[in-house]
Image (tube, rainbow, N blue to C red):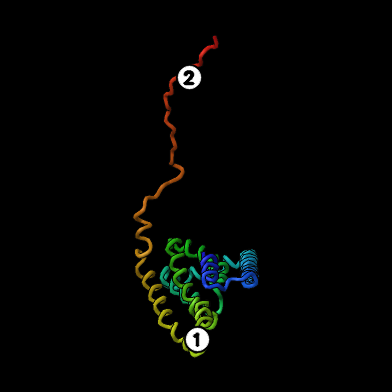
Amino acid sequence: MGVVGAIALAKFYGTLTWPLLYQGMASTMRITAMVVYILIGARVFSLVFQGVGGKVWIEDMLTSLPGGQLGFLIFVNAFIFVIAFFLDFFEIAFIIIPMLAPVADKLGIDLVWFGVLICANIQTSFMHPPFGFALFYLRGIAPPSVKTSDIYWGAIPWVVLQVILVAIVILWPQSVSYWIEKGTNVDPSKVQITIPDIDMPPIQFDQPK
């Protein structure tokens, strides 16, 4: 949708040309290939890490943290907040989360609520210097008079708001799970589909004379 909107705007302003469209398509293909290679590398790393017993080691270490569920959540969110300074959300989602989800499940934490909590925390990675995507977006459209340091300082209030949101989700789980619990839980094994019999009058064919 974003691409279609950008093409429509370029056409509206009269700047749409075939060389420009080709350049955009080529850049998109290179970035997509880079992301796919990152995902493949992250998956290979996860498989090797689990194959050598790293999953068991992580579970033993995180389940023995003091404080139980609360201690685990505080440690995990602090770790993701710090690691987001250096890793993008792709790497966090495909390397870190597969290690944390089994531990959360073992501690009895609702995985849907845990996923929402982690997503709220990962959102800060867009505004973390030095690799925050949102900061680079702003740098690309900001006039030369705006310094990069000004953009970094301007992102701090938004990062603080995200941290407050993470604290609210931890301290008030109902903010996420209320509508889930309010919904109707359906057991697929108990669903029965019945097709009522329809009484159709017999079809009569005229005998040829």
Please give the residue where the numbered disc 2 appears in the rendered image. Answer: 203
Q: Say which mark, if any, is on residue 143.
A: 1
In this orientation, which residue lies closer to the viewer: 117 or 89?
Answer: 89
Could you classify mark 1 by the number of other residues whose Cα lies within 10 Å: few (under 14), some (14-19), or many (20 or more)? few
Residue 63, image x, y percentages: 48, 68
Tag 2: amino acid: Ile
Q: Say which mark, if any, is on residue 157.
A: none
Residue drawn at x 35%, y 70% as measured from the top left: 171
Q: Tag 1 or tag 2, which sits nearer the N-term?
A: 1
Residue 127, image x, y percentages: 48, 79
Residue drawn at x 38%, y 76% as measured from the top left: 164
Could you tell me if residue 162 is visible in this image? yes
Tag 1: amino acid: Pro
Can you tell which quarter of the image residue 174 is in?
bottom left
Can you tell which quarter of the image residue 3 is in?
bottom right
Residue 170, image x, y percentages: 39, 70
Q: Give the secondary structure at mark 1.
A: loop
Q: Give the secondary structure at mark 2.
A: loop
Q: Is residue 186 above or below residue 107?
A: above
In this rendering, position of residue 130 left or right of residue 44: left
In this orientation, which residue lies closer to the viewer: 128 or 101?
Answer: 128
Residue drawn at x 57%, y 73% as measured from the top left: 15
Question: Which image quadrant: the C terminus?
Answer: top right
